[in-house]
Image: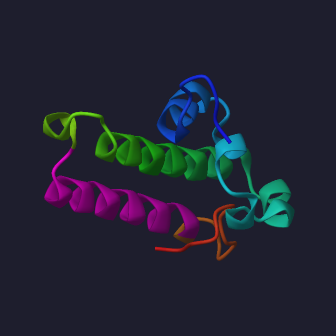
Amino acid sequence: MFKDGLDIAKYVEMNSPDRTLNIVDPELLDDKQLQEIPVTMKEKCIECLVSVLNTGLCCVKISPNERMAMQEVAARLHVIKEAYAKAISGNNGIICIIRSTI
């Protein structure tokens, strides 16, 4: 799938945060609700996605010494999950654009 030294991590780095929705598997997005939610809510959900992607990038550094410790990864993902839950709870029950898999 990737050529000329491009890999999944480089692809994410090149496309994040401006084209985050192009990176994410379309199965995780709900196009109908994407159109219905307020712009500020959409931005908050995308911010959560970018945070998850950045955390993933910290886990795939070439040198193991540069990688984030799993305890820190878990803590960071927990914070992101809480931010996401807060974002969708403030949306009067409308599910955010990202189908929750956490």
At a point 49% along the width and 51% down the height, the residue shown is: 48
Residue numbers of the magenta segment: 68-88
Nearest to the observer: residue 71 or residue 48: 71
The colour style of the image is rainbow
At a point 67% along the width and 34% down the height, the residue shown is: 19
Give the number of marks. 0
> Where is residue 44 drawn, in percent x and y?
56, 48
> Image quarter for residue 79?
bottom left
Residue 45, relative to residue 67: is it above or below? Answer: below
Q: Residue furthest front?
A: 4
> Where is residue 58 drawn, in percent x and y?
31, 41
Residue 59, relative to residue 37: is it above or below? Answer: above
Nearest to the observer: residue 63 or residue 19: 63
Please state, as top left, top right, bottom left or bottom right, where the N terminus lies in the image: top right
Q: Mark yes or no: residue 17 visible.
A: no
At a point 73% along the width and 66% down the height, the residue shown is: 27
Nearest to the observer: residue 85 or residue 6: 6
Question: How would you classify the magenta stretch by its main secondary structure?
Answer: helix
> Where is residue 18 drawn, in percent x and y?
64, 29
> Image quarter for residue 82?
bottom left
At a point 30% along the width and 47% down the height, the residue shown is: 59
Nearest to the observer: residue 5 or residue 68: 5
Q: Is residue 83 magenta?
A: yes
Q: Mark yes or no: residue 41 visible.
A: yes
Determine whether, in the image, residue 35 is placed left or right of residue 9. Answer: right
> Image quarter for residue 54?
top left
> Where is residue 56 drawn, in percent x and y?
39, 48
Q: Is residue 76 magenta?
A: yes
